Amino acid sequence: MSLLRSALISLSRNRQLRRFGEHSSVGTRLSSRFVAGMEIEDALRVAESLNRQGISVTLDSLGESVTSEEEAHKAAGVYHALLDAIAARKLEANISVKLTQMGLTLDPHLAESIAANLTEHAKATGSFVRIDMEDSSLTDVTLDIVRRLHAHPDLHGAVGVVIQAYLYRSQNDVEQLVADGIRIRLCKGAYKESAMIAFPRKVDVNANYVRLSCMLLSSPVYHGLATHDEAMINAAKSYAAQNRILPSHFEFQMLFGVRRDLQRKLISEGYNVRVYVPFGREWYPYFMRRLAERPANVIFIAKNLLRR
């Protein structure tokens, strides 16, 4: 399974396959399980459907590193349109943003300025901006930007970040972010990282995920536990029950198209659930990382390709 995961992550960076996938009907069909659609309206339609089921949503316009300031502002424009639509339609939704899509690798000041404008817009409309975490080379700059945004009096409470449990450093990062009162989405991590900085064994990643989950549940801040792993979910539920932590104090987060049965089950049990809904034409890297995270998804996709 580790070899398959490594292969899929490598394929996520293949430009030729990406070009073919994102411009072919076969690719669109493949991606439809995990991607809401190509346009804003597709994502909003899915968000409305999930809200009717009692499920909150995070909307993500797919895309990563941009090559110009113009592209960065164009990407930000999509998120501003989303925030307006969320407010107009009264959706229980927020947005997730990658800083490289806002120009981080071109100019960190540009990315921070764009992220600040988005957070200001979210605050004004009663929404929230989650800054996604990317590969480990960007962890420090991402956390620094989030801390500065959160510390601004006009933006306080309207911005959060993602922490990846497979990194050795994550416990220290969680401690600092919790002390600052910053909301965290905890995930296991979906990038290929060296054993020098990340747990190479799944069992150790899982143990660290549970450890960090308990830290988040014990904090006074509302956090999100992003996992489809029932063992991780059950560990969180058990810790919460033992420590009299109400289900309203946190939320479970899952990906669009993954474990819909479990999403419904958690809602029926009284837990908060938020689904991460990606959309857009630049879906290929995201799709390949979803397959890498859970190789069983490869079998699922293969079976569905055989169906009419």
Image (spheres, rainbow, N blue to C red):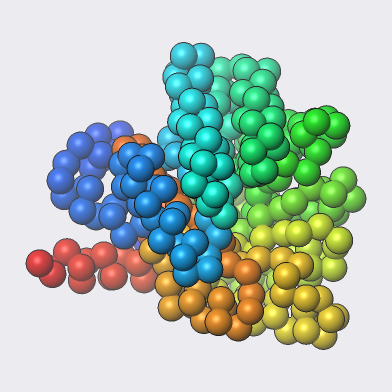
Residue 189, percent across and down? 57, 55
In the rendered image, which quarter contains the C terminus?
bottom left
Residue at the farthest left position: 308
x%, y% of residue 45? 37, 52
**Is 18 on the left-hand or right-hand side of 79?**
left
Q: Residue at 31%, 65% (x, y): give it.
A: 298
Q: Is residue 221 above or below residue 43?
A: below
Residue found at the very far right of the displayed protein? 179
Which residue is rendered at x = 79% and y = 53% of the image? Answer: 174
Left or right of residue 75, residue 113 in this image: right
**Residue beneath the point at 20% across and 71% down:** 303
* Residue 239 visible to the viewer: yes
The quadrant of the picture occupied by the N terminus is: bottom left
Q: Residue at x 48, y 32 (%)?
A: 81
Q: Identify which residue, 202 or 159, lies in the foreground.
A: 159
Image height of 232 relative to 130, above or below: below
- Residue 244 at what x, y percent from top left? 84, 81
Does 135 sit above or below residue 258?
A: above
Q: Position of residue 9 (x, y in %)?
A: 41, 50
Residue 65 visible, this orientation = no
Figure disc tally: 0
| Rendered image quadrant of residue 152 | top right
Left or right for 286, reference 192: left
Quarter of image, res 128? top right
Apparent side of residue 192 relative to residue 183 in the rendered image (left or right): left
